Amino acid sequence: MKFVWRIVDVVVGGVFVYAGALKVLDPIQFGLDIDNYKSLPWFVSVRLAFYFPWLEILCGLAVIFHVRYRGGLSILSALTLIFIGATIAAKTRGLDITCGCFGHASQKWSFPQHMALDLAILIGLVALWFATRLRRATL
Amino acid sequence: MKLRFLREGLILVALAALPAIGEGIYFRDKVSWQSSIPASELVIVDQARSWGDGALWVDARPDDDFAKDHVPGAFSLNEDRWNELLPQFLPNWSPDKKVIVYCSAESCNAARDVAKRLRDEAQLKDVFVLQGGWEEWVKKNR
């Protein structure tokens, strides 16, 4: 069973490392993607565009290599929840947004596709939380 | 012990700032920190009008808005029908002409996005975004 959870660790962490790496390569485009949500002023969006991808990469690596594991898991869960909330809010405001979560690759994704992926990631993160608690309880 | 995840999280939050700052320094001259459109890519209504026939106007708003009213002589070019409208627009362009893209108002992003695609995909030079968009144009032309 432990082996299965390690695979989930690597898959979930790997998704964030991959997503972060794509955005690190083009922070300006990611800034424009954040700006499309029309929730934050540009000077905040552009700074977050430089920061968030590195946070994703670092937390993804933390989950993969089990270093600061719970910290990484908490931040990735929070980021995913924030992102789901922002996407739903943008949709209800009628904004036609491109999430930019996976750089150019995700620009053509529909709203249901975005949500499906986000929920799958969230389920993975929640499962890892439970697995951690389970492991602690059995020790 | 219970707050371990918080302590670990804070460490990761702090650590991520280091490469982010480094990348920000690397990009400092390539990014506009105060506005999503660099000042050099913006044009005000009066200046745009002074270019006269040397400018091509591009309306990045949806078809319905364009049909209601638009800048005289403007071409409709929005992202919804990009592949269809771009070939209609391009034959009118020549290297000596400036392109002015506008959308509804200051807050819209369509003009910025269309201008970017004209530069990146169509390789056009001298592409500007009209400051204040259609709203500002109407105000100045009342």
Image (spheres, coloured by chain):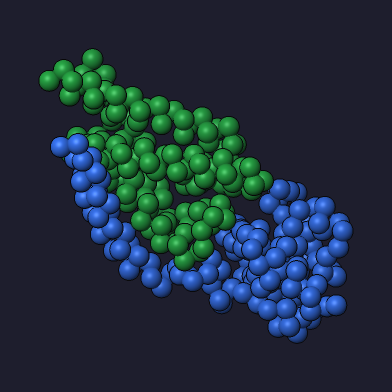
Q: Say which of A109 and A48 sits in front.
A: A48
On screen, A38 above or below B95? above
Q: Residue furthest front?
A: B2
Q: Which chain is green?
A: A
What residue is rendered at 83% in x and 65% in y? B70
Q: Quadrant of the C terminus of chain A?
A: top left
Q: Is residue A138 left or right of residue B62?
A: left
Q: Nearer the viewer, residue B5 or B16?
A: B5
- Residue B94 in sight: no
Tell me residue B110's x, y (percent): 66, 58
Residue at 63 percent across and 59 percent down: it is: B109
* Colour displayed for chain B in the image of the structure: blue
Q: Position of residue A117 (x, y in %)?
A: 48, 32
Q: Residue A136 lies in what quarter of the image?
A: top left
Left or right side of A99 for B100: right
Identified at 57% across, 44% down, the residue is A89
Query: Quick check: can you spot residue B103?
Result: yes
| Residue A60 rendering spot, x and y as whole percentages | 29, 40
Residue B69 x, y percent position in the rendering: 86, 63
Quadrant for residue B99, please give it: bottom right
